Amino acid sequence: MLKAFGGYLRDNFCKDKTRLILWYPVLLALGIGFYFTLSREPSKWITLAVIESLIIVAVIFRRRLTILKILGALALVVAGFTLIQVKSIYLYAPPQNFPDKTFYFKGEIAAIDSNYQGRRRFTLQNLEDFDGNIYPGKYRIVQRSKKGEAKVGECVEMVGRIMPLARAVVPGGYQFDRKSYFTGLKGSGFAESRWFRIDCPEGGRHKTFAAYIADIRQKIVGRIAELLPPDEAAVTAAVIAGERSLIGQRLNEQYRDSGLAHFLSISGLHMSMLAGLMFFLVRFVLALFPPLALRLDTKKIAAVWALFMSLVYLLISGMEIPAQRAFIMTTVVLLGVLTDRRAISLQTIALAAFIVLLFNPEVLTSASFQMSFAAVLGLIAFYEKVEHRVRRFLHIDGMNKWLRGIELYVIGVVVSDFIASLMTLPFAVYHFNMVALYTTLGNFLAGPIIGLIIMPFVLVSLLLIPFGLDAPFVKIVGLGIKWVNDITAWVASLPGAGCQVPSMPFWGLLLIVIGGLWLMLWQARWRLWGWLGIMVGILSLLTVRTPDILVSADLKAVAFKNDDGRLELVSSRGARFVKSFWQGKYPFAETKTTLQEHPELVVAESKVSLAGKTYDLGQTLGINFYKNPDGSFSAETVRDAIGDRLWNQ
């Protein structure tokens, strides 16, 4: 029996040998992911010893091809681990001690955006206080006033307050400080005074390419704000310049609940449409001149211009991870046109994932990376299986061409949206505790507007902005955005549009990811094993429990579970951020409670006692308590969940 099973594995492996290249980014990601799961910072000397050991073993078995292949796979895992460890060490700086009061500081503007309330926000670097103390890193400061035009690269001074960055507020919750660590952000705060422009030290700094791009983005966003009403301008700025900070909370929730939140993030939808439209436009213009069309390869000329436009769009969009992935895949496809090769395949997305992780390994933990690649991977894997059926359908004799096109469009939108939604569902549940039930309806209604009105005129607007002729076309984009906003508002108002669900445990998500990759990357019959990982991962939702007691690190937020299984907040002031995060993650009742109604929890200064055990909140950083069947309590602390790492010391 064991021999037969070995033969089964060998046969399937031989059939799928050409698919091994698809697993290279997965192995790289495995090493990166392992680094993030550790509770303590690993020793760089151990990592170095592992690398040297692999080299020694490879030299010893240099004539054994099978062993070298296994070592190559291990080397990719170790490479991923080493990449993220080296970057973490490189970015490390001792924690900053900020004055616990309002103080004077000055610095150089590295970026300008707005927070969710529409207030202007500066990201400052080279920060210095009145006494000449230097604060390395970047600091995000919300401004008190919108007066005055500021530019990236200028130096400003103000009076304000800076605080350390927020950490995770529940065990297993989002680690805000980890994301900030890898972006170089060291603190955030707010200005108490107006900002004043000053001369930069040493006669001013030379303007970098990034500063030029930031200026262009800022001007584009300002131009859009002048031409369109606030809601239309906010979404248009997100679609054209990748500036999502202008979108208000209400509008953001409508897009989320309607399943159209992906439209606010520049990704494959925008990049492929823009490149495709540019490709068509150039070929159409060249076709108007027969002498050129007959002598030149217009397809390759159009591909070059489409590639150039994609690069411009990537730069002004802010180069978010979905945009990077979309640009790499678009580039590969267009290079395929230039070299007369077919390039739309799983190898394309594997290459995109490998490049993104190679230069930004920390993005593996981000929802944008996971959802973007999952959606595209699912779509390519699905159409790889049904491609021959689609081609057969397109060549049916006797069927009206227009009717066939309309039918194919409708089926394509519904099926593609269903697959993309299914692929991103586990990540939406894990990260956001939210499922949009009418996502297919929202995408079906908004899809034609996005494809036929918004994106074509986005392209025209970008082409004409340098000449100042973009106003009428930006307004047409705004009109399309208004219609899409109305659709999202209507879909989000339907009963149960945004359904809150419990977040699955990490091990459940991991099983779904491994099972999904196994199912899609292999082609032989053993790929069906992937369903086992997917099903067990889904069943992990049955193990999720709502905490019986929640306690924040500063004791300003406390909640108890009532008889209905919902949590009730203790009436208190402050900790608005923590409370809103809790309410987005767990089921909460509208009613409030008091500590007097729950004498089992004893609160004293920065400590809490429960069932005879005392916990120091300064050490635990927040606690979830769970009641056991025997009446005792078990505790999960934030510190145990996040570990002791470079970004949370």
Image (spheres, helix red, strand yellow):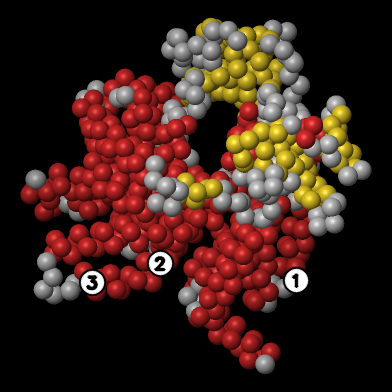
Label located before the other in sequence (3 or 2): 2
Residue 550 percent location from the top left of the image: 73, 40
Which marked residue is nearer to the observer: mark 1 or mark 3? 3
Q: What label does residue 334 carry, if any?
A: none
Q: Is residue 317 found left or right of 197 in the rendered image?
A: left
Q: Nearer the viewer, residue 172 or 292?
A: 172
Tell me the element at label 1: helix
Mark 2 — residue?
Answer: 382
Residue 43 percent location from the top left of the image: 80, 48
Q: Residue at x 47, y 46 (%)?
A: 498
Residue 341 percent location from the top left of the image: 32, 63
* Quarter occupied by residue 274: top left
Identified by mark 3, the residue type is Phe
* Quarter occupied by residue 137: top right
Identified by mark 1, the residue type is Ile
Callout 1–callout 3 Cβ contact below 8 Å: no
Mark 1 — residue?
Answer: 60
The number of numbered badges drawn on the structure is: 3
Marks 3 and 2 sit apart, C-alpha to C-alpha, by: 16 Å
Q: Residue at x 23, y 41 (%)?
A: 453
Q: Residue at x 54, y 65 (%)?
A: 517
Q: Is residue 199 above or below residue 572?
A: above
Mark 3 — residue?
Answer: 393
* Quarter occupied by residue 204: top right
Within 10 Å of disc 2 (Cα), the crowding (few <14, some 14-19, many 20+) is some
Which marked residue is nearer to the observer: mark 2 or mark 1? 2
